[in-house]
Every structure is written in structure tokens, then in C-alpha cells.
Image (cartoon, rainbow, N blue to C red):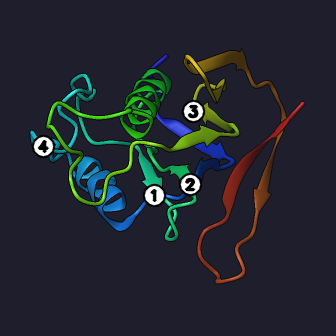
Amino acid sequence: MSGELLRSFGELRVEPPLGPSEIDLLEALRCDIPPGPSQLANVVEPPPGPCAWRATDDGSGLRFEGDSVGLRVAAEWLRYLIAALRRSGCAASTPPTGFTFDHVVSGHVDVVDKDGRWVRLMPTDGGVTELIGTVVFSEVRVVPRSDGSPAERRGVAA
């Protein structure tokens, strides 16, 4: 399951919202910059490559924005982030400034790759549940764009 992603739908909720330091860490991970030793010292190594998840501006949600990663990588990164956000502490004697490790991630995000493979990622108490299936397109529509740019071809799910 590693085709390029076509679309993602939905947004995960984060309660309490991420703080500025936590949002900055997530952005650094999106740029493939590993966390510093004092930030997430007890969390396992992050998956390879840049993180495909982005925090909302107010920190109350996570959106999937990994249009060129596979479905498996999307799930691996979500597992890593949930472990990091729910950590009750880190190896340092006191948590780094701006990190609370008390976040709960909920909701679900649906992701479809270019081959029609679909996965619903749902955070759970034990990590992430993946529901996997295939999207069957019954027709393809050409959708004109209002700005005059080339039309977009869209599959319509059966």
C-alpha cells in the first residue's frame, strides 16, 4: 500500500490544543528535522522521511497533507505523533518548556491513493486503527475550473 495519495478527507481533533512549541515541533518534523534530545527523548524514532501531518493554526486539530507518501507511511506517522502527544513525560527530569504530553487525538481521516486503495485512520487508546478497502469509481467527470485553468478529472465513487 504505497501508491501516491489522491485525496484525504477529515481532520483529527486534538484536546487540549497543541501549544506553540508543539506546533513548531510538528512543522520541523514536516521538514524532516528530527526532534532534539530534550523534546521527545522517550518516544521511539520517527518514521523515515518528512511527517505528513500538519497542525491546524490554533493547534486543535491535525490534517493529513502528505500527497506523495503511501498509506502505510501515513499510519506510521500518526502512530508516532499520538505516542509523542500522549507521553506522560520524557527522559528529561522535567518536560521541555511548552510541552504538556497530555493531548488526546480523536476522530478519523480517510485517505485514498491513486490506485483506489482507501484507508480510514482512527486514533484509539492503543494507537491507530486502520480500516482498509478499495474505492470503485463508476464514472469519471471533467470538472471545469472557475479560474480558466485546465479542467480536473475526478472519479465518482460507486
Q: Nearer the viewer, mark 3 or mark 4?
A: 4
Snapshot quadrant of residue 49 = top left
Residue at image x 40%, y 36%?
Answer: 81
Query: The residue under label 2 is which amino acid type?
Result: Pro
Residue at image x 45%, y 57%?
Answer: 18
CB under 8 Å between discs 2 and 4: no
Secondary structure under the numbered disc 1 in the rendered image: loop
Residue at mark 3: 114
Residue 108 location (% of width, % of height): 69, 37
Residue 59 location (% of width, % of height): 50, 62
Q: Residues within 10 Å of mark 3 (few under 14, many from 20)?
A: some
Residue at image x 23%, y 54%?
Answer: 28
In the depicted view, which residue is nearer to us: 104 or 25? 104
Q: CA distance from mark 3 to mark 2?
A: 34 Å
Q: Residues within 10 Å of mark 1 (few under 14, many from 20)?
A: many
Query: The residue under label 1 is which amino acid type?
Result: Leu
Q: How many marks?
A: 4
Give residue 18's mark. 1
Q: Is residue 106 above or below residue 97?
A: above
Q: Nearer the viewer, mark 1 or mark 3?
A: 1
Residue at mark 4: 38
